[in-house]
Image (cartoon, rainbow, N blue to C red):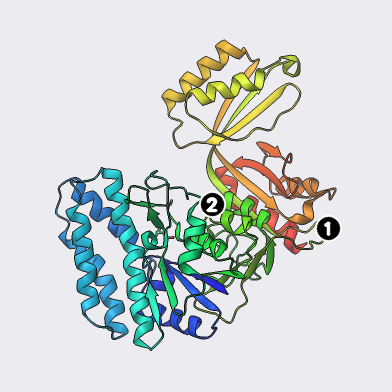
Amino acid sequence: MKVCKFGGSSVADDIQVAKIRDIITADETRRIVVVSAPGKRHKDDTKVTDLLIECAGRCLSEKDHTEVLDEIVERYAVIQRGLNLDEAIVEEIRADLTARIARKEEISAACFMDAMKAAGEDNSARIVAEAFRKIGVPAEYVNPRDAGLLLSDDFGNAQLLPESYQNLEKALKDRDYLIIFPGFFGYTKAGEIATFPRGGSDITGSILAAAVKADVYENFTDVDAVYPVDPRHVPEVSVGISEMTYREMRELSYAGFGVFQDEAIIPAVKAQIPINIRNTNRPEAPGTMIVHHRRARQGSVVGIASSVGFCTLYIDKYMMNREVGFGRRLLQILEDEGISYEHMPSGIDNVSVVFREDNFTPEVEGRVRDHIMRELQPDNLQIERGTCLIMIVGEGLYYTPGMAAHATLALFREGISLDMMNQGSSEISMMFGVQSSHREAAVRALYHAFFKE
Ligand code: ASP
């Protein structure tokens, strides 16, 4: 039995929804369908979720929202007209949105925002179910509340409550109709809607696959496979990854591989359900399988990811290694400012800490500097912004000598200086820090070194 999730581009219009119907009816083991909200139809289009956020924002600031509301309804009307569905569905969607807006005064702003955001996938599931019934396939929209998908009340960043698995198994397993389930949201114990972080329909799919113990979780998107490098940086990349492990995917999605929401992998990993990334527009392509274990050739790299927006703090202090509690006190200073660190490579007399730049304002930086100088009295303290992290990932890196040398030589040949290197605790990845302006050149150089030489 397969659980299939279709992303925003796969429900963007009537033509895409028709492709979903073809894919599902071609394989009778595809029994549960999770859908996103309609996404972009072309480069300059707007995702329905973004329209909903704008609509909610307008409501909250008492601005006129009728135009954007009409635009949202029209996105569903395109699907209704194109597939010749009953017109009533569009009116139901408008009524649903109006009812959500009417609750604005009853609930907090964060709760209201989530209820609005969730309308994208909720109505997408309703219309997709209708599209299946239109061609005689028994299909039912299932509401996450009825199925017992319970979440914490961290609006916009909700976490799954563990009892959901049992509820979902009971509600969804062995049905004699096709289940169409909206992604991205669930309900709090108090009965309010809460959403996962953006891109969270992947998480819903993964949870459902784990709950019903699916044989495969098929994640349909708009690329043939996961590529070893981002094609925007290396356009000549043509061969996708046929198989990779959960660990490899986790490391790559952390460092910027956008194909799969990075939290989404966890439920499938725990239940050991293989994930198959596939293309709605080319369903004949086998896609990328993400599995628990694979046999990797020694020294082989599966992918190279890069991510910008980091800061690096360097500290030198002679005999640091002898000072008990130095690392703890340094991290405490960052913790006091609410900064969570990403990496912390260290030497005998030096240590660097990498963290995200987002909330590191000049005022925070000033306080951190003063605090460190006072408390730790380093010989040298430097903070550099604009760090890009590059991650080279592969099960084949495990105990293979010479890999770091190969990478650093490739960067050296391009004249790219390394700000930081970390090949510590993860056996399957190496991480480099370079200046963000060198991002593309660095990724290209490493791609050529590991995939072309
Ligand atoms: N529609 C939501 C978003 O745009 C969730 C998703 O598509 O996975 O983030």
**Residue position for label 2:** 263
378 lies left or right of 320: left
Tell me, yes or no, if residue 444 can be seen here: no
Q: Nearer the viewer, mark 1 or mark 2?
A: 2
Residue drawn 78% across the image and 46% down it: 404
The verdict on label 2 being within 8 Å of ligand 1 is no
**Residue position for label 1:** 298
Q: In this view, which residue lies farthest toward the right?
A: 401
Quadrant position of the N terminus in the picture = bottom right
Residue 151: give x, y in percent of width and height.
Answer: 42, 50
Residue 224: give x, y in percent of width and height.
Answer: 57, 73
Tell me, yes or no, if residue 141 can be seen here: yes
Residue drawn 40% across the image and 79% down it: 139
Q: Amino acid at mark 2?
A: Glu
Spatial CA distance of label 1 from label 2 is 28 Å
Residue 83 to residue 252: above or below? below
Instruction: Compare residues 12 and 449 and report the one nearer the observer.
Output: 12
Q: Amino acid at mark 1?
A: Gln
Q: Around disc 2, counting alpha carbons within 10 Å, would you say few (fewer than 14), some (14 to 19), or many (20 or more)? A: some
Residue drawn 69% across the image and 67% down it: 243
Residue 405: give x, y in percent of width and height.
Answer: 80, 46
Label 1 with label 2: CB-CB less than 8 Å: no
Q: Around disc 1, counting alpha carbons within 10 Å, would you say few (fewer than 14), some (14 to 19), or many (20 or more)? A: some
Residue 228: give x, y in percent of width and height.
Answer: 65, 61
Instruction: Compare residues 205 and 256 and report the one nearer the observer.
Output: 205
Residue drawn 33% across the image and 72% down it: 126
Residue 117 to residue 434: above or below? below
